[in-house]
Image (cartoon, rainbow, N blue to C red):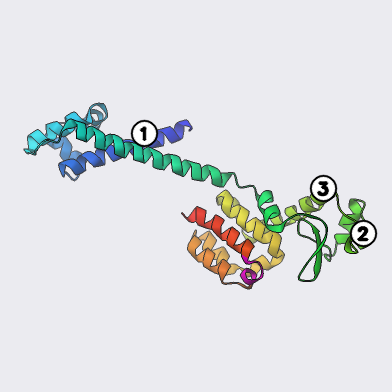
Amino acid sequence: MNWYKKHQIKTASLNDLINRILKILKISSITTLAGVIGLTAPQTIVQIQKNPQKVVQEAQDQLGQQEMPSQNINQQIEQETQENIEKEKNQENIEEKQNKINIEDLIKKNEGVSNQVYYLDNIPHIGIGFNLLRGDAEKLLNNVGVDINNVIKNKKRLTNEQINYLFEYTFNEAKGIAYRFMPSLDDFPQPIKAVITDMSFNLNNSIFEFQNFEKAILNKNYNRAIEEMKDSIWYSQVPNRVNHLISIVQEVKN
């Protein structure tokens, strides 16, 4: 955990501690508490950091409240502080997990990898979603020393190097489409960038039909974005892929 995160946890824990003490004493603000024990608000905060149970007991004396055993006060404070630290750690783990999303790996998982021809909607593909009917397919295959006719006739299988060459080309295309679709893409967390790039890879320029989805993302209305993903012909075509992408958006939303 870096210094900034530790500082955040420390600050959050102090705030929780102050709120807990105010709740125990049934006092609305730190300023009111300071007045009860005869200190300024900053002095009161310092005393809370040093010895919270002493602050509580002094305030209870002044207010004529029944004292809570110091052990119980300490236990409550320690428990709530620990719970807050755990929440911060969990949030940090979620953020770390999200930042580790690799866009290329996501696309490979959704597309699958095949070294021989396969068909999607009667269209021949190979490698990682490489459409063999695209206009420059023959040229790109020639670049890796492969005759497209032999590939389509299933007489030629591609090596990993050849597959990766084609994927690098189409992946860069997808990134270009993603940034044309949403020029401010870098302002969003990695999972959203991954989802939109994957959509661009799968849909190509058809992603520009998702205007309501784009608007929802720009407004960070992820619930609405998910609805737009579900309410599309695309969803009926590749439901498993879309559901996978929806699950990623939901993690950001949560």
Mark 1 vs mark 3: give the one in front: 3
Our reading of the magenta stretch's main secondary structure is helix
Residue 89 position in % (x across, y down)? 44, 39
Left-right relation of 109 to 169: left
Label 3 Cα crowd, 10 Å radius (few <14 / some 14-19 / many 20+): few
Q: From mark 2 to mark 3, how far is it between C-alphas? A: 17 Å
Which amino acid does the dot numbered 2 rest on?
Lys
Q: Residue 10 got which mark?
A: 1
Counting every numbered tag in the picture gives 3
Left-right relation of 7 to 21: right
Can residue 180 be seen here?
A: no
Residue marked by disc 2: 155
Residue 70 position in % (x across, y down)? 18, 31
Q: Residue at x 49, y 58 (%)?
A: 220
Stretch of the chain drawn in magenta:
234-239
Residue marked by disc 3: 160
In depth, the one of 179 and 200 nearer the eye is 200
Q: Residue at x 68, y 68 (%)?
A: 206
